[in-house]
């Protein structure tokens, strides 16, 4: 058990820039590798998940070098990607896996892909089944539902597909496959999910239209252009400190250069709605993505209902939003968030387990959570289930608990936020 003897209830104060956005970092490596020529990606997130994507392209012969958080990618173009001689290991990263399955299915190479224990339980049929409709040849455990998978890549058929799950990973996998198909691909999305793939494809010269939830992509006729990209700060990482500031008295923080793409800013809407003092400033568009500074300070909070189209706009922030709700007056209800059950762990169960242990009044439902606030959190021994977002939520909970919180393992923070503890130490007042 690790001990969290961080200064309890000390305000957070100052300025900070969080590491690059995980979703954009993955996509930047993929498109830079598919482009022909040299790309430069600065403020890249060098967390474990994004490095899995880097390693996959290195195994296919792409030269990628990293100097601090700047990546130089010598894109080979799709036809020069080599067949990897060993299986590709995707660790804990759902995004790497789903996106790469889509791409690999459409390239003329044979690959096998696998992951860690958590990833090996996560559903892959959500990408494998539609790819099979495009005539992909993919086999794997449980009839292709689970890793490991063997992918016999070939030219696929363009198609029209209505997404049955609210998932940007599925959408992106099919768009990547569609880039090299023999006709256009249309994805119908009833609830908008993060649109970084579409934004980047547009910026790099692909023919793609997005209207009323219909995304239509034409196969590439010429190579993608190399990128020169600054990756905005990850709002999903900033969310931990936004919430910490909202619940610790006398806190005040400015987080600079945060990605403010509207498909990701549900956390800001919820903080505003619950009464936190939060403002975005200095908004601008950098390489097709909105970016700005976020200032936040503590204020009395009230409960809310979180459901419907906002859910994909804050899906990864639900663990920290649950903690926020324990500090708000009244009952907060989260619905339509069944996707939480197939993340790194069943996050509905994990959130309830951690917060109940710390004395919160919280129950899980089939598609969300009910949280009765406001409660003073006690200390206790909690398990993070090897899930980075549960570990970081538990650390923030320790900051407002009356007694010490012991967390079994926090090493998973390096999956999405390797500098989480040093950033926290930087803004914590002593
Ligand atoms: O496309 C992406 O980069 C991501 C999409 C989301 O997953 P789903 O598409 O499964 O909802 C999110 O939870 C994940 O952290 C990153
Ligand atoms: C769900 C997440 O990531 P992934 O699906 O890429 O593993 C996450 O980062 O919270």
Image: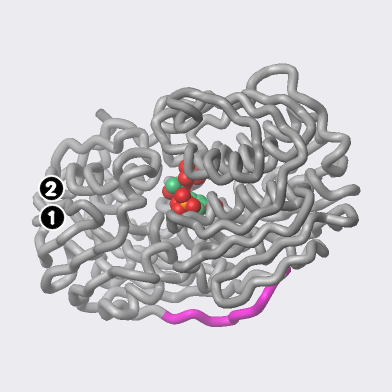
Residue 36 in view in this figure: yes
Residue ID at (41%, 70%): 266
Q: Position of residue 214 (x, y in %)?
A: 59, 69
Q: Which residue is mark 2?
A: 356
* Image quadrant containing the N terminus: top left
Q: Position of residue 20 (x, y in %)?
A: 59, 55
Q: Nearer the viewer, residue 204 or 133?
A: 133
Counting residues from the start of the chain, the first of labels 2 and 1 encountered is 2
Residue 389 part of the magenta-drawn span: no
Residue ID at (88%, 53%): 223
Q: Which mark is residue 105?
A: none
Q: Is label 2's Cβ within 8 Å of ligand 2?
A: no
- 10 Å crowding of disc 1: few (<14), some (14-19), many (20+): many
Residue 422 in view in this figure: no
- Which element type, helix, strand or loop, lies under badge 2? helix
Question: What stretch of residues is rendered in magenta?
Answer: 279-287
Q: Position of residue 224 (x, y in %)?
A: 84, 55
Residue ID at (53%, 82%): 281
Contact between marks 2 and 1 (CB within 8 A): the answer is yes
Residue 284 part of the magenta-drawn span: yes
- Which element type, helix, strand or loop, lies under badge 1? strand
Q: Nearer the viewer, residue 175 or 377?
A: 175
Instruction: State left or right for residue 352 relative to residue 202.
Output: left
Q: Position of residue 55 (x, y in %)?
A: 68, 32
Q: Which residue is mark 1?
A: 362
């Amino acid at each position: 058990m690790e001990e969290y003897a961080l200064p309890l209830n000390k305000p957070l104060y100052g300025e900070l820039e969080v590491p690059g956005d995980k979703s954009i970092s993955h996509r930047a490596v993929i498109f830079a590798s598919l482009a022909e020529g040299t790309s430069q990606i600065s403020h890249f997130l060098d967390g474990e998940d994004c490095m899995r994507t880097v390693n996959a392209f290195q195994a296919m012969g792409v030269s990628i070098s990293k100097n601090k958080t700047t990546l130089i990618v010598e894109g080979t173009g799709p036809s020069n990607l080599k067949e990897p001689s060993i299986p590709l290991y995707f660790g804990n990263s759902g995004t790497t896996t789903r996106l790469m399955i889509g791409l690999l299915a459409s390239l003329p190479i044979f690959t096998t892909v696998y992951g860690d224990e958590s990833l090996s339980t996560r559903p892959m049929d959500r990408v494998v089944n539609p790819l099979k409709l495009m005539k992909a040849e993919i086999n794997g455990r449980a009839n292709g539902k689970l890793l490991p998978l063997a992918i016999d890549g070939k030219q696929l058929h363009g198609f029209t597909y209505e997404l049955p799950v609210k998932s940007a990973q599925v959408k992106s996998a099919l768009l990547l496959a569609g880039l090299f198909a023999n006709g256009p691909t249309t994805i119908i999305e009833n609830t908008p999910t993060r649109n970084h793939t579409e934004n980047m494809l547009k910026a790099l010269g692909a023919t793609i239209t997005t209207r009323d939830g219909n995304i239509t992509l034409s196969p590439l006729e010429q190579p993608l252009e190399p990128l020169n990209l600054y990756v905005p700060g990850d709002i999903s990482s900033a969310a931990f400190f936004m919430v910490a500031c909202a619940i610790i008295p006398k806190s005040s923080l400015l987080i600079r250069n945060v990605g403010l793409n509207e498909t990701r800013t549900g956390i800001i809407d919820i903080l505003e709605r619950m009464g936190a003092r939060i403002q975005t400033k200095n908004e601008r568009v950098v390489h097709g993505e909105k970016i700005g500074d976020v200032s936040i300070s503590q204020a009395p909070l009230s409960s809310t209902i979180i459901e419907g189209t906002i859910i994909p706009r804050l899906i990864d922030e639900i663990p920290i939003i649950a903690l926020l709700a324990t500090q708000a007056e009244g009952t907060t209800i989260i619905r339509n968030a069944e996707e939480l059950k197939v993340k790194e762990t069943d996050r509905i169960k994990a959130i309830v387990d951690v917060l109940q242990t710390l004395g919160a009044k919280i129950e899980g439902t089939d598609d969300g959570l009910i949280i009765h606030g406001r409660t003073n959190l006690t200390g206790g021994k909690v398990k993070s289930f090897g899930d980075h977002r549960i570990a970081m939520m538990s650390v923030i909970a320790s900051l407002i608990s009356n007694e010490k919180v012991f967390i079994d393992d926090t090493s998973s923070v390096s999956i999405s936020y390797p500098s989480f503890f040093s950033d926290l130490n930087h803004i914590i007042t002593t």
